[in-house]
């Protein structure tokens, strides 16, 4: 472990993720952005992506100003070509990916009675919340297997554990992500790779195109980032397979 001493970091605090390259999908805003700051503060060089280049650049500059090593690349995680370029560039510029956080996701178009949903909405939600995890994980896992180590953290949702009226395509995407995550964990544990899934309740982000009515009654993006850090700093011989995250206040 190493320690750093600069104004923007936790001076003299050991850095448990020093040198562990972390790739965070959808790191430009919301939960992914908070995860990027948290893992950078723990010493990880950070690769991040999103589709909106302007927002990505702003976040990357803010992260760089903390002294972190950053690679920010415009990439659509629903497009396999973009994903392969992203993983290649991150490994070339930062080093082998040791932590993958599959965070990119969306709720827009994913809610409402199922008979009112379109095929385009189905494809958009499933591709963004599920197929992307398949694409990015598939690109990163072979290197982790070679090195016999790695952490993959999938950001799911309590909507992947519960059913409710109007949950429709979004719930389906996150239930499927739960299944994929559990199977990945079993496939990869023999290779020294730990797969965890985090299921937050509502988080104060622009995920639905607007923030919550009362941010004090839901989770913050930093709460989720804290859980990711907790999972990644778990003792090496074990892994936290699933986290359910709820706000203290009742919504
Ligand atoms: N907010 C909640 O209440 C909540 C609760 C439980 C779980 N979650 C999950 O947490 C994750 C993050 O959500 P959030 O609340 O932070 O949402 P957000 O504020 O809307 O941020 C989503 C991030 O993902 C990126 N993204 C979306 N589609 C992408 C694509 N096709 N390719 C690359 N990047 C993409 C966005 O950047 P661009 O738009 O620029 O591409 C952005 O950086 C999602 O998986 C979500 O399902 C959210």
Image (spheres, grey):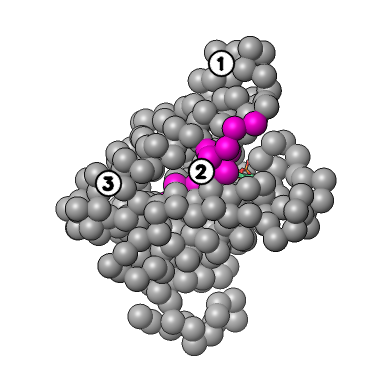
Q: Is mark 2 within 8 Å of ligand 1?
A: yes
The residue under label 1 is: 120
Where residue 85 appears, as percent x and y from the top left, is 35, 39
What residue is rendered at 31% in x and 43% in y? 184
Q: Is residue 210 magenta?
A: no
Where residue 22 appears, as percent x and y from the top left, is 40, 57
Pick out the residue farthest to the left.
146
Give the vertical position of 35 relative to 52 (above or below).
below
Separation (CA) of disc 2 from disc 1? 22 Å
Find residue 16 and report its image quarter.
bottom left
Q: Is residue 162 magenta?
A: yes
Using residue 8 as the reference point, say whether residue 67 is left or right of it.
left
The residue under label 2 is: 156
- The image quadrant in which ligand 1 is located: top right
Using residue 136 as the reference point, say whether residue 60 is left or right of it.
right
The residue under label 3 is: 186
What residue is rendered at 42% in x and 30% in y? 131
Separation (CA) of disc 1 from disc 3? 32 Å
In this rendering, which labeled residue sits more in front, label 2 or label 1? 2
Pick whichever, 86 or 126, lies toward us.
Answer: 126
Where residue 39 appears, as percent x and y from the top left, is 48, 64
């Amino acid at each position: 472990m190493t320690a750093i001493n600069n104004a923007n970091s936790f001076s003299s605090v050991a850095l448990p993720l020093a040198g562990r390259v972390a790739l965070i999908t959808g790191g430009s805003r919301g939960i992914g952005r908070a995860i990027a700051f948290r893992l950078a503060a723990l010493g990880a060089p950070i690769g991040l992506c999103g589709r909106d280049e302007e927002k990505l650049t702003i976040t990357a500059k803010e992260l760089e100003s903390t002294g972190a090593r950053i690679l920010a690349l415009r990439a659509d995680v629903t497009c396999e070509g973009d994903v392969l370029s992203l993983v290649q560039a991150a490994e070339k510029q930062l080093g082998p990916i040791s932590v993958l956080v599959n965070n990119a996701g969306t709720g827009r178009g994913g809610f409402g009675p199922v008979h009112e949903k379109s095929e385009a909405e189905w494809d958009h939600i499933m591709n963004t919340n599920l197929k992307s995890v398949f694409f990015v994980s598939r690109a990163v896992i072979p290197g982790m297997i070679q090195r016999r180590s790695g952490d993959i953290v999938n950001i799911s949702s309590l909507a992947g554990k519960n059913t409710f009226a109007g949950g429709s395509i979004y719930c389906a995407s996150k239930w499927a992500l739960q299944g994929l995550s559990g199977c990945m964990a079993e496939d990869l544990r023999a290779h020294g790779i730990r797969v965890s899934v985090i299921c937050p309740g509502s988080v104060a982000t622009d995920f639905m195109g607007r923030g919550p009515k009362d941010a004090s009654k839901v989770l913050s993006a930093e709460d989720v980032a804290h859980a990711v850090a907790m999972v990644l700093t778990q003792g090496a011989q074990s892994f936290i397979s699933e986290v359910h995250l709820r706000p203290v206040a009742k919504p």
